[in-house]
Image (tube, coloured by chain):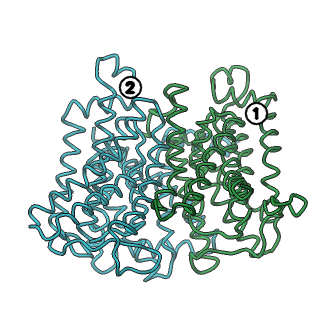
Amino acid sequence: MEDLIIAFLRSGTPIVYIAIAGVIAQRAGIWNLGLEGLMIVGACATIVTIRLTGSVSLALLVAVALCALLSLLLWFVVEILKANQIIAGLGITGLGLGGTSLALTAIFGSEAAVFAPHGLPRLGPAFGVFGSLSILVLAMPFLVFGIWLVLCRSRFGLRLSAAGEHPFAARAIGVSPTRMRFWALLLGAPFCALAGAELAAGSLQLFSVNMTAGRGFMGFAAVIFGAGHPIGATLAAFFFAFVGALGIRAQLLYGDLFPSSLLLSLPYVATVIGLWISARIKGPSAATNSELGRS
Amino acid sequence: MMTEQIAAVLRACLFIAIALLLCMVIFAAVGLSAIDTLRGVVEGAFFRPRAMDHVLRWGLPLLITSVGVVICFRAGYFNIGAQGQFYMGAIAAAFAAEALRGTSPLVAVPLCMLAGIVGGAIWALWPALLRVKAGADEVISTMMGNFIAALVLVHVTSGPLKDPSGSGQATSSLPVDAAHRISATTGTSPIILGITALVVLLGWWLTRRTAFGVLSGLAGRNPTMVTWQGADVERIAIGAFLVSGAFAGLAGSIELLGPNGRLASGFLPAHGFTAVVIALVASLSVLATVFVALFFGALASAALYLPVMAGLPAAAIQIINASIALFITSRTEAAENLLSRWRARWKT
């Protein structure tokens, strides 16, 4: 039972962090499909920096800086050049996936997985069987609560939502939606970095090409499933992780009865079902079907 | 009309130039020589022996898939599941090819392609139904479809169609009956060229000469208006998804019967995303896709050339594709505004 909970927390935490970044952007009116790319950049930067310098805090700093840089690039393209959010976001994802594999080849000479001598600090023996979890797992509920305070209980958060929901009204009271989205993407960047760091250095201490395997998109789906609310998105992210952990469990128990690669697809199927349920609850989403980049 | 098209071409060139600038910054940031890398890409794409063969080998299947993407995007649906539909087409065709082993190619090849078309269309149908009937966002559902299809491909190549002689981690299926191959491993063939031409003609006819084309183009811009005019937006949407899935599936079956000759887990992982980029660079015009797809076919062939001949990482091509995607939907007016604002700041 305990190892199931540990596996569940381990696989859920990165998705929660990336979903929080998605929630912040979503409330400001940006559909951030670059989450996948931001997450893998965070993961790669953490492992490579730990490997090269040995310092975990420096690694997190580098990861945050790179995620912030990419987030601001997305902001520039979407808000200043007025590009389509969905396509530009996928572009950021492609840059992240390609850029990390390019960086591995440039630094280590091949695309093989990179190992770090140590990962993030662990909770330690004081937490008993959960001691092997990283501190980011423990920090997660506090950070989610903090973000809930900022987004739902502060003047800044309300302005952010205004910029997303009624940009014209926001402008009328002197809030620039463009500027609010800048802050939203910047605020989301550390969460992308932590998501990547937890994924790569939380328990594994390694980075391999394409290791996010769609978790960024799952995080985005959690944002939609959770109706753009930090608590809702957290629960949705844990739901996807729960199904994933269940799939891995089933693979161990019934691997010879049921093909393992199909069990691995369970979290993706769960995401689709989650999407379907949330659409049934909310009604059709208005955000797509927007005008494409036709000149 | 003509000046409009020239403006579209200039616009695409402008944003591709900006994208290449970003690529050079990234190359330099990871410690590669930006100029050498770009030279390697151009060399691999256009100036290697038999470059034209390689361009067609990679460009034609991409062209087929991107015509489908164009049709779906015109209708206003972000079907980014071309990769999964392509895989499902290839898988369906592989099962058909396995069942038809030993029969006449005149029977087997069309049937395999039909299987590919159906496989791709089915994989586009469920996101379409989720979108139309329940309002579930198609971007995420098609994206999840890509991941699921990739895992189904792993399952098929390591289970039902596994090549028992294969070893190592990357699994592959038994090779297709040699008599059913429509091209050699390298290069292309008149059959593939002919099918591609047919697909382009069909796509052009659908978008320019049918009620479906006109209505889907309008629905992409303003679905409410089309609904009020009495057209069935649901049917248009499902039709657009089905056509785009069918074309992606056809491309999958062509890759199977043509250059690949067998299924391999994770083959051509960038196919679907590249097709989306092609459709956008071609500003959703079927005829423009022909040229754009050949350009990206050249880039795809350079991805294989780079590591072998120039000692450069193949991911360079992925970076180029992604950064073109990042910028290609930008508005020229927005860029002009920015420029004039900067100019004004310089003067004061």
Residue B106 screen position, x and y as percent: 8, 63
The crowd level at tag 1 (other Cα within 10 Å; few <14, some 14-19, many 20+) is many
Q: Amino acid at mark 1?
A: Leu
Residue highlighted by disc 1: A151
| Location of residue A289 by image quarter | top left
Number of on-image labels: 2
Query: Going 29% across and 42% down the picture, which residue do you hit?
Result: B242
Q: Colour of chain B?
A: cyan
Task: Name the subunit of mark 2.
Answer: B
Q: What is the distance, in whole Å, between disc 1 and disc 2 at their CAs?
A: 33 Å
In the rendered structure, find residue B223 and report the number of the disc placed on it: 2
The crowd level at tag 2 (other Cα within 10 Å; few <14, some 14-19, many 20+) is many
In the rendered structure, find residue B224 and report the number of the disc placed on it: none
Q: Judge by depth and name the residue closer to the eye, B16 or B232.
A: B232
Query: Going 57% across and 63% down the picture, which residue do you hit?
Result: A252
Tell me: B107 left or right of B114: left
SS of the residue at dot 2?
A: helix
| Location of residue B227 by image quarter | top left
Q: Judge by depth and name the residue closer to the eye, A227 or B174.
A: B174
Q: Is residue A58 above or below residue A275?
A: below
Q: Is residue B191 above or below residue A152?
A: below
Q: Quadrant of the N terminus of chain A?
A: bottom right
User: Does the rendering let one see residue A72?
Assistant: yes
Instruction: Indicate the chain coloured green by its letter.
Output: A
Query: Going 38% across and 41% down the picture, which residue do you hit?
Result: B126
SS of the residue at dot 1?
A: helix
Tell me: A184 left or right of A217: right
Residue B246 screen position, x and y as percent: 27, 48
**Residues at marks 1 and 2, common chain?**
no
